[in-house]
Image: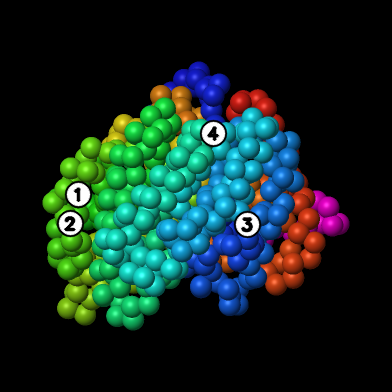
Amino acid sequence: MQLIVNKKFPDNFLWGAATSSFQVEGAWNDDGKGLSVIDMKKKDSTITDFTVASDHYHMYKKDIKLMAELGLKAYRFSVAWTRIFPNGRGEINKKGVEFYNNLINELLKYGIEPILTIYHFDYPQKLVEEYGGWISRKSIEDYVNYACFLFKTFGDRVKYWLTINEQDHVMRMPYRLGIKEKDKKVAEKLGYQACHNMCVATAKTIENFRKLLPRCKIGPAVSYSMVYPATNKPEDILASRDCMLVRYNYLLDLHCKGKYSPPYWKYLQDRNLTPTIYENDEKLLTENKPDFIGINYYATSTVRYFPATDENPIGTKFGKLLPEGESGIYMKIRNDNLKTTDWGWEIDPIGLRLCLKELYDRYELPLLITENGLGAHDKLENNEIVNDDYRIDYLRQHIEQVKLAINEDIPVIGYCVWSFMDLVSGHDGFDKRYGLVYVNREDFDLKDLRRIKKKSFYWYKRVIETNGEKLY
Ligand code: BG6
């Protein structure tokens, strides 16, 4: 629908940028920090040296100065659980608490609103060893205790909170759960139990949050996207809707409606994936909904119907952990209308607006874009410039769509570029860079870790200065 564009970004719009602890901090075992599941996987990594990452732990003051120069209104970061509780619970590490106190105070010094993610992939290894981590019901209490400690310690200064980053990815990746189960079927079922436990932990945390920080706001950060039908054949349209359900909507139905939708429950039953649910869980979930939804958006996908056969019965998955297809539901195909990143992610700015509209239609909650950005092979030229015009194009086109969503009165409260500075990418080390600020290192050559403002830094600065009016 074409509308008259006469609405602007609200004055208090949170122009932000984001990072996560294990991807920027480094100092992986300094000052009493305990080990996380990511440390276990990555300490012997052949992809990149992540133990130092961007060394933000030691350089945060410099980095925040750059954030201030950029004019950031908000900075999304995550707390490394094992810096606070090296064993996941019990003894508190004062040095870790001190680090985040300093970080938050430094942000506030420059008027930057902290957006704190409680947990972003780096789950305490000790809890996995003790009881299996998220796959056990015991995990709920430890997460809630940890979160409550953060509320009591930082809640006087932090207004916006994110509970769990992309639990939909965590549940599908055994190494992020920390489990070593070899049998794929068993591992998959454990993942669904972990997902349920994470939802209950979130609800219990929100229940406590309401008492401890009644004036603050909390929500999950989920990956979200649109799934398009490959053709106008009704079965392809069904496939796209079903894929949306099993990949994205099931989770927000749990967080925001407090229940498993009937078709999703049937999907789980047919595949023997149903989690164990306790009597009080539904009540807890229904009574403790989030204040807003945080979404991480990068790309869309397109699917065709993919019927199950004797050879590929219902439940068979294709591709890696985030499946390319599931027999009986969908198979992804390439969308020729969209360009891709160097890693094959389909670039789709309108897809972001569609997501915002879809989410608001379904859940009627304010929306915070917690991640959006472009991974690229950036090149440092003459030792001083990074001409990342491709990133500017990507960000501009996505922000334009956010503006159009706001023009339709969709309550988007903020937008965080992923990422503020170059960091260790989840799967591609330092080869794939997302930052507005270049960090001078390669995968295994740490060089001088110098910070260099990319062209996109200057562009985003102007966007913020003009409250989204000057995008060119
Ligand atoms: C999101 C994560 O999944 O996507 C980030 O929250 C991650 O931690 C980002 O870095 C991009 O993914 P990748 O694999 O390109 O780093």
Q: Judge whether residue 382 is colored magenta.
A: yes
Inspect the image, locate mark 1, and give the three-letter code of the amino acid beneath it.
Asp
- In the rendered structure, are the residues bearing label 1 and label 3 in contact, judged by CB atoms less than 8 Å apart? no
Q: Which residue is mark 3?
A: 25
Give residue 157's mark: 4
- In the rendered structure, are the residues bearing label 1 and label 2 in contact, judged by CB atoms less than 8 Å apart? yes
Cα–Cα span, label 4 and label 2: 36 Å
| Dot placed on the residue nearer the N-terminal end, 1 or 4 | 4
Q: Which residue is mark 2?
A: 277
| Dot placed on the residue nearer the N-terminal end, 2 or 3 | 3
Q: Secondary structure at mark 3?
A: loop
What's the coloring here?
rainbow
Q: Is residue 316 above or below residue 147?
A: below
| Dot placed on the residue nearer the N-terminal end, 1 or 3 | 3
Q: Is residue 236 visible?
A: no
Total marks shown come to 4
Cα–Cα span, label 1 and label 4: 31 Å
